[in-house]
Image (cartoon, rainbow, N blue to C red):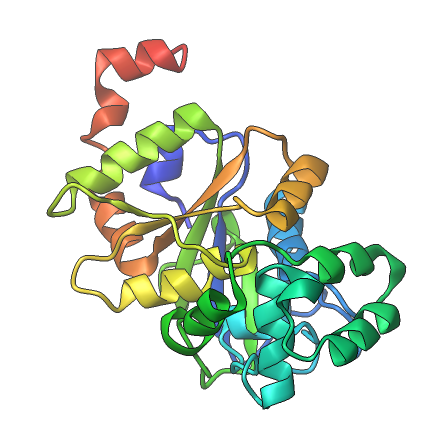
Amino acid sequence: MKSTIVKNLRPEFEPVAVVWSDTIPAGAFQYKNGKFGCVLHLFAHASTGGKIAGGSRESIICTGGRAALGFGTDFDASDEQLDLYTALFSKGHKSAENRTAYQATIEAAPKNWRSMYEYGERRHCSSKSAREWILHEFPRYNIPYRYVLFKPLSRTSFNENIRTVIFPVNPVEFSGLVTLAGSVMQGTDPVRAPQGTDCCSISAFAYSEAESASPRAVLGMMGTDGREVMRKRFRDDILTLTLPAPLFLRMEQEADDCVFQIPSWKKLVGL
């Protein structure tokens, strides 16, 4: 795909298309079935490595990663599971209703995960708040496709089943994209900054926005897990701005006659 946005923005890092598919290309990177791997690394692999990556219900064993990509939501599959995730998303051991069972989870976890389980991710101030988020606020999908692919945008075509386009952006690139997004939308709020796991910001939350009457861009990589990936693969000043497909297409139509063409933008980016 020859993107008009990319042509004008000239981003430092390759944007990545999230594609729903029943097949995965030969040679694409994916985790071995049963082996843990983070969804965020699939995105980073596509952006910085230029390779196609993907996941399926079999190869994504992280409950949060499967829910983010749209392979079903199991946070509340049982009362025990719900207690685990409400504690994990809030204040860890001290938020758990069954602290004995939660302590067993901590002890069974890999060593590098134990502090996360013990203290929690602190995305919510209480287990009650986390429970409301899981039950009523998290966008749930069980997509009718086998794979979710992360493809460098330059390696996609417009006729593919693109659901979102993820732009890893520095502050200047972010300002340009937000201005362009706001110019094709009604209202004054072109960006959504949802509270949730970072893999959700590049997939499930953007899927949800695509279904709204006025889809917004989704800001991401604001959690500690996302920042760790940004530090290893990108830089500390890089965030993600994920465009739901309908918004991306509207921005594509405007990108040759927008903020990117005015003198102050060209001066800002050194053109």
The quadrant where residue 6 appears: top left
Q: Is residue 98 left or right of residue 212?
A: right
Q: Residue at x 63, y 83 (%)?
A: 81
Q: Residue at x 37, y 43 (%)?
A: 3
Does residue 35 appear in this view?
no
* Depth check, front residue: 98 or 7: 98
- Left or right relative to 42: residue 172: left
189 is higher (above) or lower (below) than 211: above
- Quarter containing the C terminus: top left
x, y (%) of residue 75?
Answer: 56, 79
Q: Residue at x 63, y 46 (%)?
A: 224
Given residues 99 and 223, the one toward you in this image is: 99
- x then y, percent, for residue 234: 64, 35
92 sits left or right of 112 in the view? left
In this rendering, the answer to whether 227 lies above or below 92 is above
Spot occupied by residue 254 in the image (x, y as percentages of width and height): 20, 40
